[in-house]
Amino acid sequence: MSTWEKTKAQMEVVAGGAVRKSAHAMGNEKLAAKGGALQARGKARRLKEKGKEKFS
């Protein structure tokens, strides 16, 4: 896994979690869903990169 891709995935997970939690605190469920989606995309990116490592 390249360092940049690993960092990018982790940034998405952290940013998505922060957006989701702050949106829940404000009562904005639409924004919370978007934050959750960003977090899930980061987790999926991380899994994809780990899978690429195994086949390399």
Image: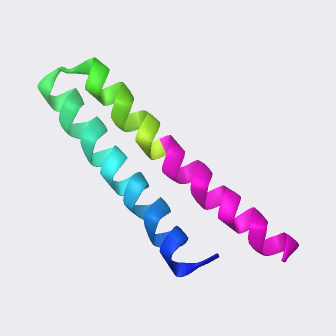
> Is residue 26 in the magenta section?
no
The main secondary structure of the magenta stretch is: helix
Image spot of residue 14 (x, y percent): 35, 56
> Left or right: 7 with respect to 46?
left
Image spot of residue 8 (x, y percent): 45, 64
Q: Quadrant of residue 1?
A: bottom right
Q: Residue furthest left?
A: 26
Q: Which residues are magenta?
A: 40-56
Residue at x-position 42% and y-position 53%? 13
Residue at x-position 59% and y-position 60%? 46
Q: Residue furthest right?
A: 55
> Left or right: 8 with respect to 19?
right
Q: Quadrant of residue 39?
A: top left
Between residue 8 and residue 29, name the one nearer to us: 8
Residue at x-position 86% and y-position 71%? 55
> Is residue 55 in the magenta section?
yes
> Left or right: 35 with respect to 23?
right
Q: Is residue 55 above or below residue 11?
A: below
Tell me how the rendering is colored. Answer: rainbow
Image spot of residue 47 (x, y percent): 66, 57
Between residue 53 and residue 24, name the one nearer to us: 53
Q: Is residue 50 above or below residue 12?
A: below
